[in-house]
Amino acid sequence: MKISGVVAEFNPFHNGHRYLLDQMEGLKIVAMSGNFVQRGEPAFVDKWIRAQMALSQGADLVLELPFLVSVQAADFFATGAVDLLVKAGVEELVFGSEEVRDYNQLLETYRTKADEMRDYMDQLPASLSYPQKSQAAWETFVGLTFSGQSPNHILGLAYTKAAAGTALSLKAVQRQGSGFHSLEKDQAYASATALRHHRGDWEFIERHSPVASLLAQAPQQDWSLYWSLLRYQILSHPNLEEIYQVNAELAQRLLQAINRVNSVEELVGMVATKRFTKARVRRVLTYILVGAQEAPLPESLHVLGFSERGRQHLALLKKKVKLVTRIGAEPWDALTQKADKIYGLGQEGIGEQNFGRIPIQWGGD
């Protein structure tokens, strides 16, 4: 049986995600972000509920991305996710894109020009952000242009680079619906951003998410629930530069701004520059919130849930890679589990995220 993989956040799961899963062939494996997501914010609902959402809509196996993969810029996010999927035996990586191109051809091109592209990026001005440097390299060496409205396409290119050293094939699926962060309600496929924004409109949510009943039962998180804790972390830390990816300039800008703002979004707006994008600042704030330090990624795979087909695949997989199906006295990934504890401070009702939890065994339709 063909083994397909997808990298996802399902933050939260919507009809577009169901469409993407339907385009996958054979056994369907999901590498899913944990309780903090790539753009630097707490997940809307916890990882176990999102895993259940995925399994209920056709996924066969859901594996957790470690914190230092989930909360990263596109290239590093893609590299960690692709590595996990390769360990899980995936043959074809499926992803949504605003621009459906022949990514396998781009993959072959990148394999021949990777060194030149990296050298080119290294000599670009330090004032440019990493995403700007990456896009400049694709434009110069491959002739791609960017509209500024194609975050999934940009992530697809990151997957292309990450897959260059593997045997993965790539399959792009036309992204359904309007803009990635569109708040519009009147559309065939609403974005995850719209579902989070209109969380109180259950008629809208039921129309655009096949797992609305699960969303209705789950505590819903956002940055506002962690604002006081974040302020405390920034103001009390003796040296912010000890935190992962915080340099002297960012530390100074944060300390100058923290007493002049009343929310995370205000803080992000005041600290961000052309060089330090808003997404990068949000990720840094996430690192500060959890006190993140650089650490090696786990070699083992943490299983959040599986179907019967997924269980059969796990039986074969455990002969090749260490699987973690129950976290006890020994951690799977200490930083991820520390982040999960802090995620649980958001509000009551979230529940234990690791100790003693076992994978969801999905037997429903």
Image (cartoon, rainbow, N blue to C red):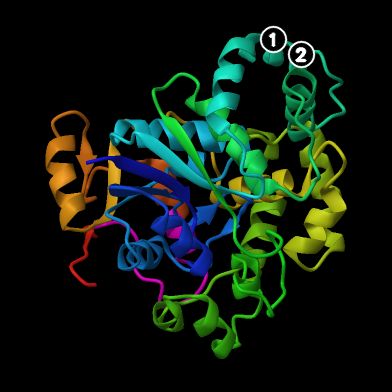
Q: Residue at x 61, y 57 (%)?
A: 41
Q: Quadrant of the N terminus?
A: top left
Between 140 and 307, the residue placed more toward the observer is 140
- Residue identifier under label 2: 120
Between 110 and 48, the residue placed more toward the observer is 110
Where does the image place residue 61, in percent across and percent down from the top left? 28, 51
Task: Tell me, yes or no, whether the two marked residues, 1 and 2, touch with CB atoms within 8 Å.
Answer: yes
The secondary structure making up most of the magenta span is loop
Where does the image place residue 87, in percent across and percent down from the top left? 31, 31
Question: Can residue 344 be seen by looking at this rendering?
Answer: yes
Q: Identify which amino acid the numbered label 1 is placed on.
A: Glu
The circle on residue 116 is: 1
The image quadrant that residue 352 belongs to is: bottom left
Where does the image place residue 232, in percent across and percent down from the top left? 66, 58
Between 270 and 61, the residue placed more toward the observer is 61
Question: Relative to residue 245, is residue 47 depicted above or below?
Answer: below
